[in-house]
Amino acid sequence: MEQIKLFRSKTILPDALETQVNNFLSENEAKISVKDIQYNTVITAKENSDQLVWSAMVRYEVL
């Protein structure tokens, strides 16, 4: 059965998001077959500062 897993990280650099996704993939490598990974970056504007929000979606099939 095909499923998705969503990840999100609010940071300047994508390192935290990469770590989350890579940990998920490592922990489940024998249980899933990855079909696709997509990511997106959004800048949110606030009064005093802007913030980057990184997100990723892993589409996978359970083995």
Image (cartoon, rainbow, N blue to C red):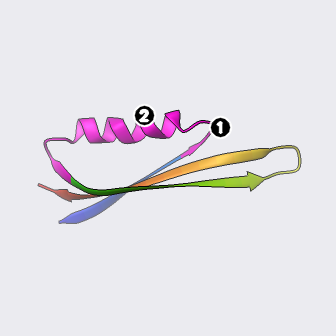
Q: Give the residue type at disc 1.
A: Ile
Q: Is residue 10 magenta?
A: yes
Q: Which of marks 2 and 1 is nearer the N terminus?
A: 1
Judge from the rendering whether residue 38 lies leftward or rightward of residue 3; answer left or right: right
Judge from the rendering whether residue 59 lies leftward or rightward of residue 44; answer left or right: left
Secondary element at tag 1: loop
Judge from the rendering whether residue 10 lies leftward or rightward of residue 29; answer left or right: right
The residue indicated by pointer 2 is 19
Disc 2 crowd, CA 10 A, few/some/many (<14, 14-19, 20+): few
State the quadrant of the N terminus.
bottom left
Q: What residue is at 19 percent from the left and 41 percent from the top? A: 29
Q: Name the foreground residue: 6 vs 41.
A: 41
Disc 1 crowd, CA 10 A, few/some/many (<14, 14-19, 20+): few
Q: Where is residue 46 in the image (x, y as percent from the top left)?
A: 82, 51
**In the rendered view, would you say 2 is above or below 62?**
below
Tell me where residue 63 sits by quadrant: bottom left
**In the rendered view, would you say 37 is above or below 26?**
below
Q: Position of residue 21 (x, y in %)?
A: 38, 42
Q: Point out the stretch of residues depicted in magenta.
A: 9-33
The residue indicated by pointer 1 is 12
Mark sitting on residue 59: none
Judge from the rendering whether residue 5 lies leftward or rightward of residue 11; answer left or right: left
Q: What residue is at 51 percent from the left and 52 percent from the top? A: 55
Q: Does the magenta stretch include residue 43?
A: no
**Residues at marks 2 and 1, CA–CA distance in whole angstroms:** 14 Å
Q: What residue is at 51 percent from the left and 33 percent from the top? A: 15
Q: Position of residue 4 (x, y in %)?
A: 33, 60
Q: Name the foreground residue: 8 vs 40.
A: 40
Secondary element at tag 2: helix
